[in-house]
Image: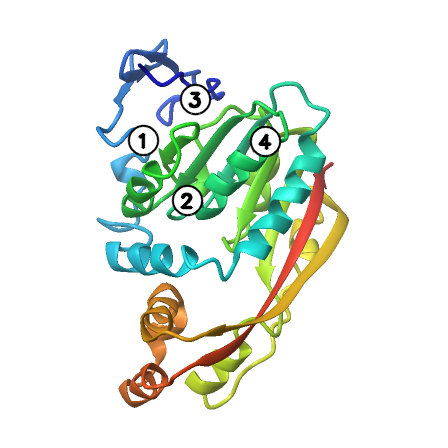
Amino acid sequence: MSHPQPPQPALCCPVCRAALHAVDNQLQCDQKHSFDRARQGYWNLLLAHKKRSKDPGDNAAMVQARHEFLEQGYYQPLSDAVNKLACEQLKDIHNPQLLDMGCGEGYYSDRLQRALSTAGLKPSFSALDISKHAVKAACHRNRDIHWLVASGADMPLTDGSQDLLTVLFSRLMPEPFARLLRPGGKLLLAWPGPDHLLELRQMIYDQVRPSNFQPAEQLAEYFSLIDQQQVHYPFTLTRRQDIEALLGMTPHSQRMQANKREALLSLDSLPLTLDVRLGLFERR
């Protein structure tokens, strides 16, 4: 039995910005630009000349580390909080369109799509990342999501087409975000609070600098902040492989000294704090 295709998203051609239409295993626009579906099921809409490196984004090792860590459920309460906010925003919209930008290996996207489905919503759900390794891994999670390799700075979706944009731990690009959303559309943003993984950072760095990240200020030209929440709880890693996976998925590991890495990996347990801010913004 064939798997029914999810509702078609409002994709546009990365070359000319004309609408893309699915024809068998290809996407085509009226200007005859075409893109083949990868055998894993994703669409690669990242043009070669738009890449800043040969293999942009997270490499295969970082993707695998993030997958192994997230599968243990340490961040599930955070995912649940994201899902609750998203379901509330979309509950009264018929066939909503949403995009998860910077989706990584798909943990949050997959759980959000399933939460929306359980709530009786039938969205056209797209998720993109600039890392081909991440999107390949994400494809194995959920076939009801349109997985895209693309740049967040040049997202291949029609301007004003999306009802909700989720951006979890990715960099801010206010103008592209605003361009993608319909007037009144929502941006759901997640960013680390000052206590996030503080214990780990104290073991890695001689001096831990407090974060003063204020996304509302950077987004003010295009967005109004309508709600902000804090997700804050302790958790403990009790396996060496989980500590190793956490190190592998964070940028901190690339800056730490070898002796500090060994000290961390020799621990029987590692108590940590999750501290994440969720901000809901409305497009002006």
As drawn, is 273 to the left or to the right of 245?
A: right
Query: Percent x, y for residue 132?
Result: 28, 43
Viewer-nearest residue: 138 or 149: 138
Which residue occupies 35% across, 25% down? 15
> Residue 118 — which label?
4
Q: Secondary structure at mark 2?
A: loop
Q: Disc 1 marks which amino acid?
A: Tyr
Q: Image point 53% across, 84% down: which residue?
A: 208
**Residue positioned 39% across, 61% down in the render:** 69
Q: Which mark is residue 106?
A: 2
Q: CA distance from mark 4 to mark 3?
A: 29 Å
Looking at marks 2 and 4 on the same chain, the residue that comes earlier in the sequence is marked by 2
- Residue labelled with disc 3: 12
* Upstream in sequence: badge 1 or badge 4: 1
Q: Amino acid at mark 2?
A: Gly
Q: Are marks 1 and 4 in contact (CB under 8 Å)?
A: no
Label ID, residue 142: none
**Picture coordinates of residue 279 (x, y %)?**
68, 52
Secondary element at tag 4: helix
Q: Quadrant of residue 155?
A: top left
Which residue matches tag 1?
A: 42
Q: Are marks 2 and 3 in contact (CB under 8 Å)?
A: no
For residue 238, above or below residue 58: below
Q: Amino acid at mark 4?
A: Thr
Q: Nearer the viewer, mark 2 or mark 3?
A: 2
User: In the picture provided, is 275 more to the left or to the right than 145?
Assistant: right
Quadrant showing the C terminus = top right
First of labels 4, 3 by sequence position: 3
